[in-house]
Image (cartoon, rainbow, N blue to C red):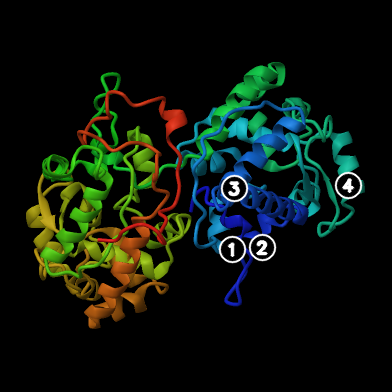
Amino acid sequence: MGCDGSVLLDGSASGPSEKDAPPNLSLRAQAFVIIENLRRLVHNACNRTVSCSDITALAARDAVFLSGGPNYSIPLGRRDGLTFATRNVTLANLPPPFANTTTILNSLSQKGFTPTDVVALSGGHTIGIAHCTSFTDRLYPNRDPTMDQTFFNNLRTTCPTVNSTNTTFMDIRSPNVFDNRYYVDLMNRQGLFTSDQDLYTDSRTRSIVTNFAVNQTLFYQNFVNAMIKMGQLSGCDGSLLLDGSSSGPTDSEKTAPPNLRLRGFDVIEDLRRRVHKQCGSGSVSCSDITTIVARDSIALTGGPKYNVPLGRRDGLTFATIDATLANLPSPFVPVETLLTDLAAKNFDTTDVVALSGAHTIGVAHCTSFAQRLYPTQDTTIDKTFASTLKRVCPTTTTNATTFLDIRSPNVFDNKYFVDLMNKQGVLTPDQDLYTNKRTRSIVTSFAVNQTLFFEKFVNVMVKMGQMQVLTGTQGEIRNNCSRRNANTNDPLMSTVVGDLDVDNIQSF
């Protein structure tokens, strides 16, 4: 899910909407009415030319400005999404008010936000209200020691019980003005939420809070940067293909440890060269070529063939190694971690198991699973299989590889799931799919029904290929898949994330 206006959608008969998730209940109903009125006015004058997502982004910018904050330009061209996030997905993506700074920094770093970004975005709390239930954990049964005593007494008057339905302003100094007083609140131990006050308590963010408290211009500058970044969350834009820059040649997404075993970059570039020679440069993006290659590789090894939506644009930047590691699940994590991480990207339990089935093709380095062999054998691994793996990997640092699917390593089929049922999964998250009660039955159903696995795999591959892509005039179509075009404009103002327009694009 990205900046696609999904929070505007009402729920359906099958379940509540993103709008109804607890963190969003404080969003005023009148605001949704205003967005819809603006859409009606724009569409009456200009027809269906502007998305609800862009209208929302503009309304947010103007609300900041009209309440005394900075005015700034924002990239436009977003498309509205076709679905809303479920309650669980919303909760997984929005840090709760009870979270400490470590939790928030870890969560938002996975989306590419720095500590300065996090502190700047938190400054949005200079406007708005909070329900008592969002902070009464700091009042009852005892006062949070990081809270000012007088402030505590005032809040207890507003919220006499833990389940009070009252509200209070998040910034007590200037609740209706967008300024830097929120940070002054924090320095005086008058932050409302745990996540607010902890910004001043935590050594990693304390100095940033202080800087913003004494320099409103600096806060505005960083708030604008973070808001623009938040509206451009990256997705399927071919960033993995880019080589490192001269300033950091070893810090590209391509060179992150989980990606070191990837091959075929020269194949992608060769295909790009052939397509552009035949159809002209700027005709097909490296992102689309990569998507088609992935689909055809599956089909050529025995898996299903399916149509994929096209029309992606190539991104202007690559993710750093740290950002890549934060977004790619480790081979050592249990399934519960995997499910939680991918739920934040709108993948359900069946999606996760189906995607894992891609391990029917491929290899793993010894270092990715040696912890299951040494110093003692993982109890969930078959003894004979463990002995075989130990011969391949006689030490924890052996630089060797083994197939992820021992039954049919070069065929795309459902035998990977049969491996799991026989305790022959190579990686921890592989075998844990069969150990975990939430996923065990799905593994079994795929092991006995390859058609079902193929069906679910196709669905989730199409879903994954539509995550926050660049479309229209966003990004670029690279003339070389490993490098940005030489004449690319300022990437900050050229890149906007949107969903694929599945009603009007081609599928192939």
Per the image, the residue denoted by label 1 is 87
The quarter of the displayed image where residue 500 is located = bottom left
- Amino acid type indicated by mark 1: Arg
Please state which of the two labelled residues, at mark 4 or mark 2, is closer to the viewer: 2
Q: Residue at x 57, y 48 (%)?
A: 53
| View extreme (right): residue | 157
Residue 126 position, x and y percent, is: 74, 34
Q: CA distance from mark 4 to mark 1?
A: 30 Å
Q: Which one is nearer the viewer's eye here, 122 or 4?
A: 4
SS class of the residue under badge 4? helix
Per the image, the residue denoted by label 2 is 20
Q: Which one is nearer the viewer's eye here, 203 or 77?
A: 77
Tell which circle, 4 or 3, labels the residue nearer the N-terminal end.
3
Residue 203 position, x and y percent, is: 58, 27
- Amino acid type indicated by mark 2: Asp
Per the image, the residue denoted by label 3 is 46
Q: CA distance from mark 3 to mark 2?
A: 31 Å
Tell which circle, 1 or 2, labels the residue nearer the N-terminal end.
2
- Amino acid type indicated by mark 3: Cys
* Mark 1 and mark 2 residues within 8 Å of each other at the beta carbon: yes
Per the image, the residue denoted by label 4 is 156
Label 1, residues with CA under 10 Å away: few <14, some 14-19, many ≥20: some
